[in-house]
Image: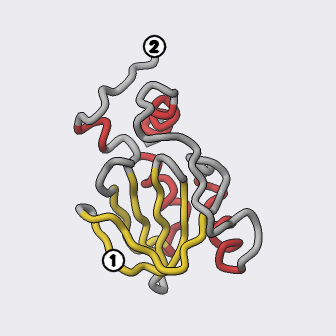
Amino acid sequence: MAVEHVEPYTAEWRHQPVFYLRRVAQVLGAEAETWWDGPCDPRAGTIRLAGGEALVWDEESGWRWGRFVSGGPDACTVLAGSRYLGGGLLLRPERVPAAVAEARAGVGNSTAWRPCYRSYRHYRDGFDVALNGYMAHA
């Protein structure tokens, strides 16, 4: 099967992370109150957690966790006291709950420093192909 690249800045491209975000929200179960994909540059998404916390994902730095301050589908999410979960851009969905528990406890691979795994400007670096793998499991 040939891998098709999605043309950058099309509607399909902007919403490509939705399948990954949905899978992570499913794994989090009842703890995930709601979720949305957010604005782009970089493409991002938010999962609101029970108790006023949230997870934010973006295509440059992966996941960060913290206390939800503001945000929505049309506005970047702001977190207080955020910590990056590590594990790369597409942390396995099954690993996210344990990474959140580690961040809450202040242990594990989480850090306050923002990692930068890639630039959102690198359109043909294979990242979109990795995102497509979550579309196949939708």
User: Is residue 81 positioned above or below 84 on the image?
Assistant: below
Quadrant where the C terminus sits is top left
Q: Residue furthest right?
A: 108
Q: Amino acid at mark 2?
A: Ala
Task: Indicate the position of residue 83 as horizontal and vertical percent values.
Answer: 60, 70
From the image, state whether disc 1 or disc 2 is nearer to you: 1
The percent position of residue 58, horizontal first and vertical second, equals 46, 53
Across the whole image, how many numbered discs are drawn on residues? Answer: 2
* Label 1 to label 2: alpha-carbon separation: 41 Å
User: Residue at 45% across / 13% down in the picture?
Assistant: 2
Instruction: Answer few, some or many: residues within 10 Å of disc 2's Cα (few below 14, many 20 plus, some between 14 and 19).
Output: few
Q: Position of residue 77 (x, y in %)?
A: 37, 68
Residue drawn at the location 63% of the way across and 48% of the way down: 88
Q: Amino acid at mark 1?
A: Ser
Within 10 Å of disc 1 (Cα), the crowding (few <14, some 14-19, many 20+) is few
Residue 121: x %, y % from top left: 40, 36
Question: Mark 2 or mark 1, which is nearer the start of the sequence?
Answer: 2
Q: How is the image coloured?
A: secondary structure
Q: In this image, 83 relative to 35: left or right? A: right
Judged from the image, the secondary structure of the residue bearing numbered disc 1 is: strand
Q: Which residue is mark 1?
A: 70
- Quick one: SS at disc 2? loop
Most distant residue in the top direction: 2
Q: Residue at x 45, y 32 (%)?
A: 122
Residue at left 60%, top 54%? 115
- Of residues 96 and 79, the one drawn nearer to the viewer in this rendering: 79
Q: Nearer the viewer, residue 33 or 125?
A: 125
Q: Nearer the viewer, residue 20 or 82?
A: 82
Q: Which residue is mark 2?
A: 2
